[in-house]
Image (spheres, rainbow, N blue to C red):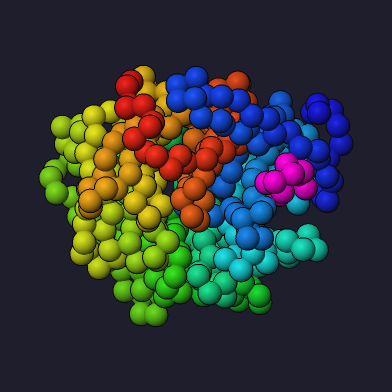
Amino acid sequence: MTGSETTGKGKRWPSERKTSVDRLTGLEVTQLTDYKAHSHHLYFTENGWYDRERRLLFVSDRGNSTNLYSMDVESGEITQLTDYEKNNALDACLLPDGSAAFVKLGSRLIRLDLSTLEERVVYEAPAGYHLGNASSTSDSRHVLTCVQEDLSHRIRLDLGNGYVGHRELMEAAPHSMIVRIDADSGKAEKVYEANKFITHINASTTEPWLMTFCHEGPWHLVDHRIWGLDLRTGEAWRIRERLETGEKVGHEFFYPDGTTIGYHGFRADGTNFFGSIRYDNTGMEETEFGFDTWHGYADGLGQAVVDGKGAVKSLSLWRKQNGKYEGPRMLCELRCSFHSQKVHAHPRFDERGKRLLFTSDKNGYANLYLIDIPERFEELPIFRP
């Protein structure tokens, strides 16, 4: 298919999937999309699988505009869900019951019925504010989001393409608010506010009252990165305090149990690590490794993956054995540029930890890839940069 073909809500696209044998590990890798425009799955903290993991939400720039799509993973057939013209950015989150997606389009948050494709605006950021990401509570009753004071008139910003203005915005301390929105009625209430650059809203996967957010900025300079919030009381607290000056911790996400939070980071001497901690700051576990990475993710079932940085061009896997993570071993080649958010790998396990979904632009355009995790971990090659 070519970019000149028409697009439209409800349009069906034939399967683009193809398989190849990975040159590093010999495992079969399935390329799910193949179009001369960027396609990527949802941000790694957000689940895009629904309909008993038979369907997958993803974002694509086909037709020269960014829209939301759904894929039948078995057949590969693609359905276009939205039809926004001349659009360059889109985020989405999925209600856990699979009935609807919430699409961030500019300053508006739109409820999209996944059966009828009907759209309804449920929230719009106040004038003078930017809309942040959205995340659905585990009971599917609410959607959480954040808004930040728009300071683009005095700070040059291009956060999605190289984090331009990242530090300056942190130092400017924009007024930010966290908002809880009724998923049906759209009734919105402010649940927290501060003069901090607040982003990275994550709802617990099991506890409707629990969420995390972050104070955004360079990880070694921000006052504190990971925060918990009790939606019943409005109480906020620090999660995973720095162990030493200059330590960097971030890219937090909830484990499937909804009470454990995963993250990755860098010691002051540059040593990389991934780890987990409960929302109440108990049960901390961390594993160090000897190369740089962009993201880490864990399935909560004893497996962890990182995507590498610089000279590291592969996805690296750890598996817990006798209470300790063993690895890293190479899962497959990645070769992702990470030049902008659209071409970040953002690896994410499926619900059972049997498959890994990731994005790579190794052929020039971002595409979605899926690989089965082998049962015998020891048969994977030991990591080599």
Name the image quarter holding residue 279: bottom left
Residue 21, compared with residue 280, is above or below; it is above
Residue 157, compared with residue 26, is above or below; it is below
Give how far across and how far down residue 160 sits, in percent: 51, 37
The residue sitting at 36% across, 45% down in the picture is 304
Q: Give yes or no for residue 357 being in the magenta stretch.
A: no
In the picture, measured across the screen, residue 49 lies left or right of residue 116, that is left
Name the image quarter holding residue 306: top left
Q: Residue furthest left?
A: 244
Give how far across and how far down residue 55 sits, in percent: 67, 53
Name the image quarter holding residue 4: top right
Residue 109 visible at all: no
In the picture, measured across the screen, residue 341 lies left or right of residue 212, that is right
Region of the chain picked out in magenta, as a range: 69-80
Residue 256 visible at all: yes
Q: Residue furthest right?
A: 6
Give how far across and how far down residue 333 sits, in percent: 47, 25
The residue sitting at 47% across, 41% down in the picture is 373
The residue sitting at 32% across, 27% down in the picture is 382
Could you tell me which quadrant the N terminus lies in? top right
Q: Which is more toward the observer, 127 or 365?
A: 365
Give how far across and how far down residue 34 sits, in percent: 69, 29
